[in-house]
Structures are given as C-alpha cells and as structure tokens.
DNA sequence: TCAAAAGTGTTCACCGTACACCCATGG
DNA sequence: CCATGGGTGTACGGTGAACACTTTTGA
C-alpha cells in the first residue's frame, strides 16, 4: 500500500479568489478564458502547481503574473477534488483568497487575461466549481472580518473612517451604526489619526487614518496560537 | 501555460488527525510505521489519493481501513505542500480531522497498523510535518467547540452532563464552572434528558442525556450559510 | 443660507461570570 | 452516619446596541 512507485499522480492546481475594494464596493477579479475548455467564460485566476514549488508559491506566482504585484495578502482556503470538476483531466485544486486595493491594481493588470473587476453581487456565472470557491471565500472573509481587524490589505495607505466602515458594510452586507463602529474600531487601538483631511468626500472634509502596522499585525495574529 | 498535457503531476495524500474521547481524556490515534522511511516512528494515519476518488473518499477509505468504522465525522483542514516534507518523493498532503468515541473504536482497530491512542498532551514525536497538522487540528477543534456544539461524535449515545463538561474541559484545556456550563448547554436546547441514571460514577447516580440529533445538526450548520 | 457629510456620548438591556449550599445514596 | 459526587439559582458588571444633534464649509 505504501509503495511510492506504484501510486497514481494527479494534476494539482491553485485558484485565487481575488477580493478588491474600490472605495465603495467589494469586488472580485475574474479573467475571461481564451483557451479551451470553456473559452470565453469567466473564471478565477488559476494555474497548475509545479513540482518544485509549494502551493503558496504557486498562488503567489499566479497572482503576480496577473497583477504584477508581489507579496499580496494571501491565504489558503481548501482543496476541491470532485472527480469531474475539470472535464479535461482529473485536477485537484486548492483555493486561495487574496486581498488587494482595487484602485492600485487596476492599472497594472496583465492585459493577456482580459481581467475585470466585478461587483461581488453582480458576478457572472463561473466555470467548473469556481462559484463554490467564491462562496466559501466570501464566508471566510466574513468570519475573518468579525473576529479580526480587516482592511489593511484592501484600503489605500490613508483612508477615512467612512471608507473603512463602507468596507465592513460591503463585506458583512449590512448597514452599521456610525458611532458604534467608530467606538469599536478605536477600542481595537490599531489606527493612527493623521492631521490630513480628505476634502473630496465632503465640504467639511474628513480626517485620514493610517493603520499602525505593528499593532494591526499583533491583533490579526491573536487567537491563532496553540502549543501542543 | 494552460496546456494540460505538459503539466507536472504530483503525489497527493491525505492524513487524518483522529480525535477520540474515553470518558476522561482527549486523545489522538497514531500508528507505528512498519515501513520505510521512518519505520518504527509514530505517524498520523494516511494514504495516497487514487485517481478515481475524491479527497473525502480517500480520507474515509483510510479511516475505515484503520478503524473498521464507516461514516465517521470527518472534516477537511488544509493542504501541506512543503517541497521536502516527505523525503522520498514530492507529496502534497491534505489533512482531515475525525472525531470518534475512543471506547467504541478501541476494540475494532485493525491490528496491522499498531495503532494506539495517545493522550493529546503526551503524544510522541511525529514524522514529517505531522506535528504541525495536529497542532492546526487542535486549534480548529477548539475554535469549533467555542462556536458550535460539539460532542455528539465523541461521546457514546447516552452520557452524563459531567462527561460532556469533561470533554469541553479537555478540548479547551481549562476548568469550567459546573452551573454555568449546564445553563449554557441547556440554552442551546440540543439535549434530551432520559430517565436513566448512570450509577457507576457516584452513589447518587447521574442522569443520562442524549443529543436531539435534528436540533444538534441544525445548530452545527448555523453560521455556515452564505448565498452569493 | 442651505445642503451634505463629519463628528461626538449616553442610556439600557442582555449575557456571561462568579459564587455556595442541599440532596441522594452506598458502604 | 458519613463521604462522595449530583444537582440547582441569583446577583453583578461589562459589553454591545440603539439613538440625535451640532459643526463645517462650498456652492
């Protein structure tokens, strides 16, 4: 049974659910396939895993290929292994989700893939089991938004409270109370108020904030630890 | 790039973290390898994935092979893909965790594997990255115990409140208050009190409970749902 | 002067936690 | 009759949710 030689090898892929935020809406980045099967349909960005790279490396490579960006925030979700999920050949795929600032990424997209940002609620039908992957990623993103701070990866360096709140509202898909939201965020103690104002959004202008990266990372890492 | 023929295939495996409970302690089931590499060392139960089975099916097959039990509670955790995690050949492994009643399983274990239950805090060193897998599984089990009811899979059909509390204490690794625990469990409304008593544990005897399977499953499934 | 968004505190209800005594029975 | 574990209820503090008015300034 445990004879390595006689075992069957399988195609292994990664697929990336790329979430972005454009100051208003939560979006996902999809590509239009220009190869068979399913040419012309929308799909997650993905690729096969090579023998000399880990899954994380494969996902990073694929993401970099599409966006030109390195070191994006990236997290493994789960493996999909239905026998016929890819009609061409048995392929097991591991899904990853990435978080990026959609405004930054917009200009740098690799034109080869006909990639386009889609509003999360207006996404087209996707090939294979990609819709399942997106739903699962969305559910994970929500859980994360409820248990840890989120936003550092999705927002520009400086942002207004309202933008951060809008992001949370987009992820959780519900309206939040302005005052309660601010109190909650302040209690986390991860923001630094700058003395600059964003004058585009209103006459009065609203203060810009930055994340305190160190405190932010500490908060994110809390509740992960476990020693055997 | 997306040419299926030219892609490299990879060995794919599953490894199972099998948690059990023996009325007192939380345990994991480990096997003693009698094949190379690492013959004689302790390891998770695992196996290679075949071309015609899903990961879930592979994990079920492997578990059944070891325990003789079918339809165990089983959940996918994550994929491990470090290049040299298995020194013989590049192998990507997906970890699963299973929950079973250690007392039931004890007698039925397949003798071929020299399997043995180990107290979770007294487990031996494991091969490869199996210790990481166990730590990750433990952390997931704790999170689950805090967000959803747990125990149905780990306890015999009828059990005392104290046994359920002991299980939670073992998973969370902390003492819980008896009264608060009972209140919390009752608030979930998933238990049925039978009129039988367990007379082994004390002179007075303690009532046995059963899970209301329907209500239990409903509670477990809550907070998973998400519609796109 | 008015429209549009920014900013700011308090009250209340509920939940989670701490905590101690009596009960039933077998030996 | 006594030792052992089983069973039960209340009081308090803290957290999360509801809620409205004033400020600024460009047009």
Image (cartoon, coloured by chain):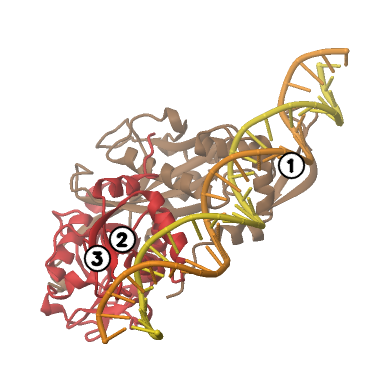
Chain colours: A red, B brown, C yellow, D orange
Residue B158 rendering spot, x and y as whole percentages: 70, 44
Query: Relative to residue A122, is residue D17 depicted above or below?
Result: above
Q: Quadrant of residue B126?
A: top left
State which chain disc 2 sits on: A
Asked whether the residues under marks 3 and 1 belong to the same chain, the reply is no
The answer to whether residue A160 shows anywhere in this view is: yes
Dot in front, 3 or 1: 3
Distance from disc 3 to disc 1, alpha carbons, whole Å, reads 64 Å
Residue at image mark 3: A197
Query: Relative to residue B160, is residue B187 depicted above or below?
Result: below
User: Mark 3 touching mark 1, by CB under 8 A?
Assistant: no
Element type where label 1 sits in the image:
strand
Q: Nearer the viewer, residue B9 or A24?
A: A24
Dot in front, 1 or 2: 2
Residue at image mark 2: A151
Distance from disc 3 to disc 2, alpha carbons, whole Å, reads 19 Å
Q: Quadrant of residue B133?
A: top left
**Image position of B113 (left or right of B20):** left
Q: Quadrant of residue C21?
A: top right
Residue B77 rendering spot, x and y as whole percentages: 38, 52
Give the residue drawn at x 74%, y 42%.
B208
Q: Nearer the viewer, residue B221 or A34?
A: B221
Give the residue drawn at x 39%, y 57%.
A144
């Amino acid at each position: 049974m445990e004879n390595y030689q006689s075992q069957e090898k399988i195609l292994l892929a990664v697929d990336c659910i790329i979430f972005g935020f454009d100051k208003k809406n939560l979006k996902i980045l999809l590509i239009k396939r220009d190869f068979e099967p399913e040419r012309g349909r929308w799909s997650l960005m993905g690729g096969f895993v090579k023998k000399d790279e880990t899954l994380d490396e494969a996902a990073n490579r694929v993401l970099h290929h599409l966006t030109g960006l390195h070191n994006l925030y990236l997290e493994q979700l789960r493996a999909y292994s239905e026998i016929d999920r890819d009609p061409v050949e048995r392929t097991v795929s591991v899904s990853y989700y990435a978080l990026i600032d959609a405004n930054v990424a917009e200009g740098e997209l690799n034109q080869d893939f006909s990639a386009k940002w889609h509003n999360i609620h207006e996404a087209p039908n996707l090939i294979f089991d990609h819709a399942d992957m997106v739903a699962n990623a969305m559910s994970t993103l929500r859980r994360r938004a409820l248990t840890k701070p989120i936003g550092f990866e999705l927002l520009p360096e400086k942002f207004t409270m309202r933008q951060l709140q809008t992001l949370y509202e987009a992820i959780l898909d519900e309206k939040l109370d302005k005052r309660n939201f601010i109190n909650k965020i302040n209690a986390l103690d991860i923001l630094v108020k700058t003395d600059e104002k964003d004058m585009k959004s209103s006459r009065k202008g609203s203060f810009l904030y930055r994340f305190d990266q160190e405190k932010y990372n500490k908060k994110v890492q809390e509740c992960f630890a476990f020693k055997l």
